[in-house]
Amino acid sequence: MKILISGYGRMGRMIEGVVLHKGLELAGVTEDVCSVDPSLARECVCIDFTTPAAFRANYKWLAEHFKAVVVGTTGWDDILGDVVAAFYAAGTPMIYSSNFSIGVNAVYAALEKVSDVLKGYGYVPHIEETHHIHKLDAPSGTAKSMASIVAEHLGVRPDITSVREGEVPGTHVVKFKSEVDKIKVSHEAFSRQGFAEGAVVAAQMTEGLSGVHTFKELIIR
């Protein structure tokens, strides 16, 4: 498998390290994915960790030229339908997620179950998320995903409080409060390593895959 990384910020550099550690072939790293030779792109799985603006500008090119694409960039939910349509039209598999951490996806599964159990018993949900000061979006894509899960399974959409401070990799706390108790479901990342490792796992999952999938639906059974 050949992997090409689009976006060489903090996550891009960490993904590069994971790819090399796993002994996979790194075909390249680029800040301008549309400049990649199409013949090379067709042999590669692209892992995209760029910016919302860059992904919006590039998704059609990604769909039309790469063997498969893994998208960790967030902030483009409003064009999800267009993105999915482009990848299906090109016949290119895509896996996307607001968070590729295995731990976070386990929390997603836990939130589904907890919300199902609490539905109808008067619990009010709230989400607190904290990230480093360099993070461009707020609330985080992960917090939005958690809110959607709770809203679907509990029937109440939680408010989200976002904090940006220091170099915090990412902490998410989902609270369910009633008149008699409070339940917390949380995830704290010690570094971005888990996100990078999950993204590479997703790239490996594209072998033999078709269609467009969330990472969550592929690892939670």
Image (spheres, rainbow, N blue to C red):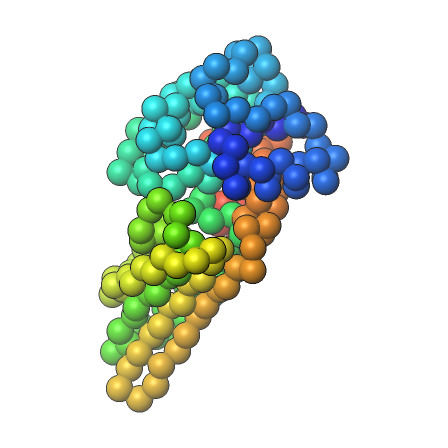
Of residue 165 and residue 118, the one placed in the foreground of this image is: 165
- For the N terminus, give its image quadrant: top right
- Residue 29 point in image, percent of width and height: 57, 26
- For the C terminus, give its image quadrant: bottom right
Q: Which residue is drawn at 57% across and 44% down?
A: 196
- Residue 186 point in image, percent of width and height: 45, 68
Judge from the rendering whether residue 17 lies leftward or rightward of residue 129; answer left or right. Answer: right
- Residue 188 point in image, percent of width and height: 50, 63
Judge from the rendering whether residue 11 lies leftward or rightward of residue 155; answer left or right. Answer: right
Taking the view exactly as shown, the residue that stands out farthest to the right is 23
Which of the 4 image quadrants contains residue 117? bottom left
Q: Does 92 appear above or below 117?
A: above
Q: Is residue 177 visible?
A: yes
Q: Which residue is drawn at 28% across and 82% down?
A: 178
Q: Residue at x 48, y 64 (%)?
A: 187
Q: Residue at x 26, y 38 (%)?
A: 78
Of residue 120 and residue 122, the one placed in the foreground of this image is: 122
